[in-house]
Amino acid sequence: MAAAAGGSQLTAQTENLRPLSTDRPDATESPYTVDAGHYQFEVEIGSMTRDGGEKSYGLGEVNVKYGVDTWTDVQFVLPLYNHIAGGAGGFGDMQIRVKRNLWGNDEGGTALAVMPFIQLPSGADGISSDEVEGGIIVPFGFEGACGWGYGIQAELDVVADELGSGHHFSFLTSATAARALTENLGVFFEAVAIFSEGSEATSEYYFNCGLTYGVTDTFQLDGGVRVGMSNDSEDFTPFVGFSTKF
């Protein structure tokens, strides 16, 4: 695809690897997996979230991926430092994810994957949910006209209650559009909706946009902003990061 769901997919190939396709910087995951026997690192260098009069920030969230076979990769998402309003800060909860491409990894105009994950309560006090959480993500990507690439995603999560004990369901759906502006520079636009049920029911809506810049075939910079569109949404989150494969 000229532009991949979940980030940019560079058209040039290096050492017979697939073009670099990333799960960042948008919320819509890529349906493509990392080449067998190769590693990919996707790093959010920093982000700052403003919600009303409160600010929180994150530094160094790392997604370490390894290609297990032609259709599968395993991922470890490590939030190295989060600071929330009120003063708590430290390592966040770790996620372990497995992405399985069902079709389209190497050819065709569409691609589909499934990605179950589990989140472990490994974070610092005041940062961790203190409960095991998890879910499943289903991303779908397809080619469009005039060099545009599109992606849609459905995600069902089991999330710990913030008040009291127990868990509730949260559902995320998103749609993204991306295209190359120049040989190296790309742009994306995205809409995201998150619905939580139960006593803590919320409806969050976001508009996200940003740029990607391919420094080489296997190294990409990115930056952008997430803008909340409802009362339950966080107001504003600028971010910057990079991805690399070897």
Image (cartoon, rainbow, N blue to C red):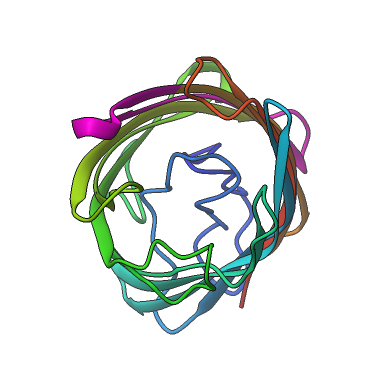
**Closest to the observer, 97 or 148:** 97
Q: Is residue 11 left or right of residue 107?
A: right
Comparing 35 with 74, the one in front is 74
**Residue 197: image x %, image y %?**
21, 31
Q: Quadrant of residue 89?
A: bottom right
Q: Which one is in front, 61 or 53?
A: 53
Quarter occupied by residue 52: top right
Residue 114 image offset from top left, x and y in percent: 23, 53
Frontmost residue, 1 versus 34:
34
Q: Please state the extent of the stretch shown in magenta in the rendering.
A: 180-204
**What secondary structure is the stretch in magenta mostly built from?**
strand
- Give the farthest residue toward the front: 164
The quadrant in which the C terminus is found is: bottom right
**Relative horizontal placement of residue 207, taking residue 111 as reference (left or right):** right
At x 20% / y 41%, what residue is drawn?
169
Q: Is residue 226 left or right of residue 211?
A: left
Q: Is residue 196 above or below residue 79?
A: above
* Number of numbered labels in the structure image: 0
The answer to whether residue 105 of the structure is visible from this angle is yes
Q: Let me know if residue 1 is in the magenta part.
A: no
